[in-house]
Amino acid sequence: MPPIAAPLQRLYPGRRIVSISGDGDFLMSGQEFMAAVQYDLPIIALVLDNGMYGSIRLHQERNYPGRVSATTLKNPDFALWAKSCGGFGVTVTKTEDFAAAFRAAEASGLPSIIHVKYDADGVAPGVTLSGARAAALR
């Protein structure tokens, strides 16, 4: 969770502040979620979990196709993390379930994590690892 989410919520209490992070990014700065809990800041953190450091893996596939090194992650249950900190947490595995999860996070009034699990091949909008590898092998 980028460290700016909690301060933004303090600056703009009437606005909905949403943080969007990959799973690797969140693992590097997820302790910021505790600041939101400590100060009762109802931010919503979307944690997009594909089980890897996606941007690093994408560079590996582009420059060294098929030679993957140290980018796979074994992640915690981020929704449970939110709950254990005193916030709201929910996991989404299907696109059609996202809207209801977001509404539930908003309705909770708590700092929230929506743990979005998705296919490891997807690393960015419109970019797949398999596509990057195929392009690099041409």
Image (tube, grey):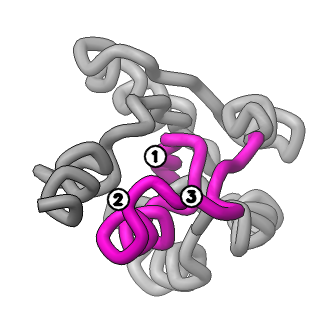
Q: Which residues are magenta?
A: 45-74
Given residues 40 and 61, the one toward you in this image is 61
Q: Give whichever of discs 2 and 3 has the lower sequence position.
A: 2
Q: Label 1's element? A: strand
From mark 3 to mark 1, how far is it between C-alphas?
A: 21 Å
Asked where in the image residue 3 lies, by quadrant, the reply is bottom right
Identify the mark at residue 48; answer none if there is no mark: 1
Q: Is residue 42 visible?
A: no
Element under disc 3? loop
Decide: marks 2, 3 in contact (CB < 8 A)?
A: no
Q: Are marks 3 and 1 in contact (CB under 8 Å)?
A: no
Give the SS element for disc 2.
loop
Mark 2 or 3: in front is: 3
Check disc 2 and report the residue beneath it: 16
Q: Relative to 74, is 72 on the left or the right?
A: left
For the residue marked with disc 1, what is the amino acid?
A: Leu
Location of mark 3 (residue)? 68
First reached walking from the N terminus: tag 2 or tag 1: 2
Position of residue 71 measured from the top left corner of the image (x, y, whole percent): 63, 60
Distance of label 2 from label 3 (alpha carbons): 38 Å
Look at the picture and state if 97 lies above or below 117: above
Rounded to the nearest whole Å, what is the CA distance between mark 2 and mark 1?
A: 19 Å
Question: How busy is the neighbourhood of tag 1: few (under 14 within 10 Å), some, or many (20 plus)?
Answer: many
Q: Name the residue nearer the viewer: 136 or 44.
A: 136
Disc 2 residue type?
A: Arg
Residue, x 59% and y 42% (percent of image)? 51
Residue at left 39%, top 30%?
Answer: 119
Q: Position of residue 124 (x, y in %)?
A: 26, 56
